[in-house]
Amino acid sequence: MAEYEEMVPGIFLNRPNRFIAYVKIAGEEKICHVKNTGRCRELLVPGTTVWCQHHPSSANRKTEYSLIAVKKGERLINMDSQIPNQVALEWLQAGGLGAVPQIIRREVKFDNSRFDLYFEMAGKKAFMEVKGVTLEEDNLAKFPDAPTARGNKHLLELQKAVRQGYEGYILFVIQMAGVLQFSPNWQTDPAFSRQLCQAAQAGVQILARECHVTPTSIQLSDPVPIQLEPISNVI
């Protein structure tokens, strides 16, 4: 479980750019670092309740707070883009894939990419790429929320690794609970969505798991059904 200290509630006001937001905390307007450079338009709506981490003793920071989580209806969504790798690592170390790997390394280079996790388990070598998911529509989780050339490249490199004898995984960490299904976002990024389907056909293992999220913690939890092909015929 990844935990946050010094968490305080606030009311989101506006986001002038990708990196900062104005949040009313304890009746005062504060500038907060947004730990997610994605669009997050459906999350950061003026008047929405958010949770921010206070950094009172960090002299090197430009902002005193970081925006970590947001309420969307009754659902709490963690939008910290740096946390999925940590919860994925903890899950892997706890035997999330059925056994505890003998070796786990972070940020390991392969060809022209650097994958989030490399591990060895049951005599096999494997790479895992981790993607955080914050987009939810009608209880369906989707990735990405904006076109991602980098994500497309990772899928191609994972397929190359599989061809060279490695096991390849992509784990979608859904940073919320209670979703019914995960699918690639065909409307927003059909290129990534097609490549994800091709990766699955090439032997890359596609995983999606939701998280138990509180204002002060996040932990990977249950698997979520995956729908790779587009449901609509318009794609």
Image (tube, rainbow, N blue to C red):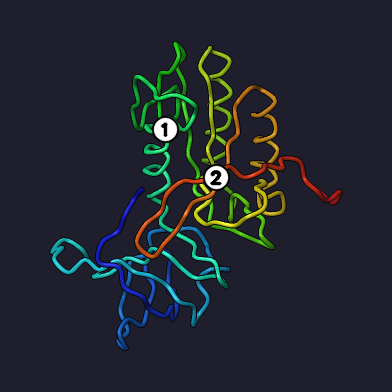
Picture layout, residue 200 above or below residue 230: above
The kind of residue on which mark 1 rests is Leu
Task: Choose mark 2 or mark 1, whichever is in front.
Answer: 2
Q: Circle 1 sits on which residue?
A: 92
How far across and how far down the image is residue 70, in percent? 46, 68
Label 1 CA crowd tier, 10 Å (few <14, some 14–19, many 20+): some
Q: Earlier in the sequence, mark 2 or mark 1?
A: 1
Picture layout, residue 232 above or below residue 227: below
Instruction: Report the residue at 32% width, 65% height from top.
Output: 66
Picture layout, residue 169 above or below residue 191: above
Query: Which element is circle 2 on?
Result: strand
Label 2 CA crowd tier, 10 Å (few <14, some 14–19, many 20+): some
Q: Are marks 2 and 1 in contact (CB under 8 Å)?
A: no
Left-right relation of 137 to 33: right
Query: Alpha carbon of mark 2 to alpha carbon of mark 1: how far?
Result: 14 Å
Left-right relation of 58 to 4: left
User: Which residue is nearer to you in this view: 194 or 169?
Assistant: 169
How far across and how far down the image is residue 60, in percent? 16, 61
User: Which residue is nearer to you in this view: 139 or 106?
Assistant: 139
Query: Which element is circle 1 on?
Result: helix
Instruction: Report the residue at 72% width, 53% height from top.
Output: 187
The kind of residue on which mark 2 rests is Asp
Instruction: Report the residue at 38% width, 59% height from top.
Output: 35
Query: Looking at the image, which residue sits at the far bottom?
Result: 27
Instruction: Report the residue at 21% width, 66% height from top.
Output: 55
Left-right relation of 136 to 91: right
How far across and how far down the image is residue 20, in percent? 37, 69
Q: Circle 2 sits on which residue?
A: 222
Q: Locate residue 217: give its quadrant.
A: bottom left
Left-right relation of 231 to 83: right
